[in-house]
Image: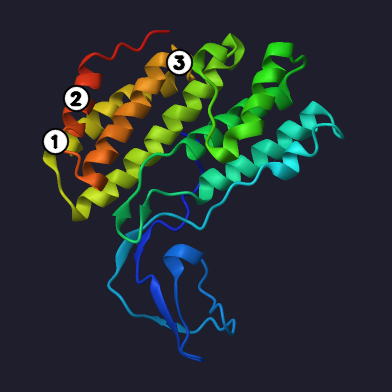
């Protein structure tokens, strides 16, 4: 799926105590093994090992937005792609043993990464493509995603691939979570979701955007059931999968 190396996927003791000065901090939150007080790299874990795939990732696209009036569109797109790629690489969905939901910032960053790659490689960029790219750039770090009816046909594959990769990454982390919190129905639904996601990837994302959005909603249903104990969410996921028709 081209996601690159996942960041920090392991079971760790995230609550740390510095052996030099005694300061305690949370690696789960900081993403750093260095003591925040003295900088020492010597510490011990003071809690049990927990699954942790989430890096201390943050997405700030304001420096890229400042380039819009100063640089070429190609340069802006290349910088946006780089920042979004790094954010996606460092992001994860299990934080100190707790499952998080597939959020809009991750989805928007994943889409912007792919759309920016298309823009930077294009010999010619239409007004609609440029407007859509700049719309993504304006709001992705705030979790704002354009509606599918705003999507130019030429960028449909970018959105489809981005969302398929996001669903794939989320499925992988949910699988890890289920090793410690088994749920037979959730596991089965994840398998079915994966079959649809692989088909989208095989089609290079060029499917009806509504269909891809359904995959995202199924992933979120499964996450909501496991993370929040929503008893009806798995039934909703099953219903969405039963009615899913991946249209090209």
Q: State how far apart marks 2 and 1 are (Cα).
A: 9 Å
| Residue pictured at 22% horizontal, 48% vertical | 178
Residue 241 placement (x, y as % from top left):
24, 20
Please give left or right for residue 158 compared with residue 237 in the image: right
Above or below, comparing residue 183 to residue 214 in the picture: below
- Quadrant location, the C terminus: top left
- Residue 239: x and y in percent read 20, 20
- Check residue 63 in the rendering and tell me which mark sits there, or answer none: none
Q: In the picture shown, does residue 45 fall above or below 179?
A: below
Label 2: element kind: helix
Query: Mark 2 to mark 3: distance in Å?
Result: 20 Å
Farthest left residue?
184
Determine crowd level at label 2: few under 14, some 14-19, many 20+ residues with C-alpha closer than 10 A. Answer: many
- Residue at x 48%, y 34% (from the top left corner): 107
State the residue position of label 3: 209
Find disc 1 in the rendering and name its residue: 185
Q: Residue furthest right?
A: 70
Please indicate, yes or no, whether residue 126 appears anywhere in the rendered image.
no
| Residues tagged 2 and 3 counted as in contact (Cβ below 8 A) | no
Tag 1, which secondary structure?
helix
Q: Quadrant of residue 231?
A: top left
Residue positioned 49% across, 25% down in the render: 161
Q: Is residue 39 left or right of residue 160?
A: right
- Compared across the picture, whether 189 is left or right of 115 comes to left
Which residue shows up at 51% across the image and 39% down it? Answer: 105
What colour scheme does the image use?
rainbow
**Label 1: few (<14), some or many (≥20) within 10 Å?**
few
Distance, label 1 to label 3, CA atoms, is: 27 Å
Residue 238 image label: 2
Is residue 190 among what the camera can see? yes
């Amino acid at each position: 799926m081209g996601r690159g190396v996942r960041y920090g996927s392991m079971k760790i003791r995230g609550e740390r105590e510095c052996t030099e000065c005694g300061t305690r901090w949370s690696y789960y939150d900081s993403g750093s093994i260095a003591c925040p007080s003295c900088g020492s790299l010597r510490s011990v874990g003071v809690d049990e090992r927990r699954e942790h795939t989430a890096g201390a990732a943050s997405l700030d696209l304001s420096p890229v937005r400042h380039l819009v009036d100063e640089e070429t569109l190609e340069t802006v797109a290349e910088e946006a792609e780089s920042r979004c790629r790094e954010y996606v690489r460092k992001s994860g969905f299990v934080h100190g043993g707790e499952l998080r939901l597939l959020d809009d910032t991750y989805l928007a960053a994943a889409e912007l990464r792919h759309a920016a790659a298309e823009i930077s490689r294009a010999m010619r960029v239409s007004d609609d493509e440029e407007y859509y790219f700049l719309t993504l750039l304006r709001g992705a770090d705030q979790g704002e995603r354009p509606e599918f009816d705003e999507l130019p046909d030429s960028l449909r594959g970018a959105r489809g691939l981005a969302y398929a990769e996001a669903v794939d990454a989320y499925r992988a982390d949910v699988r890890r979570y289920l090793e410690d919190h088994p749920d037979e129905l959730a596991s089965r639904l994840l398998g079915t979701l994966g079959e649809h996601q692989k088909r989208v990837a095989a089609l290079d994302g060029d499917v009806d955007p509504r269909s891809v959005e359904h995959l995202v909603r199924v992933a979120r249903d499964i996450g909501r059931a496991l993370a929040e104990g929503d008893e009806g969410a798995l039934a909703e996921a099953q219903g969405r999968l039963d009615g899913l028709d991946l249209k090209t």
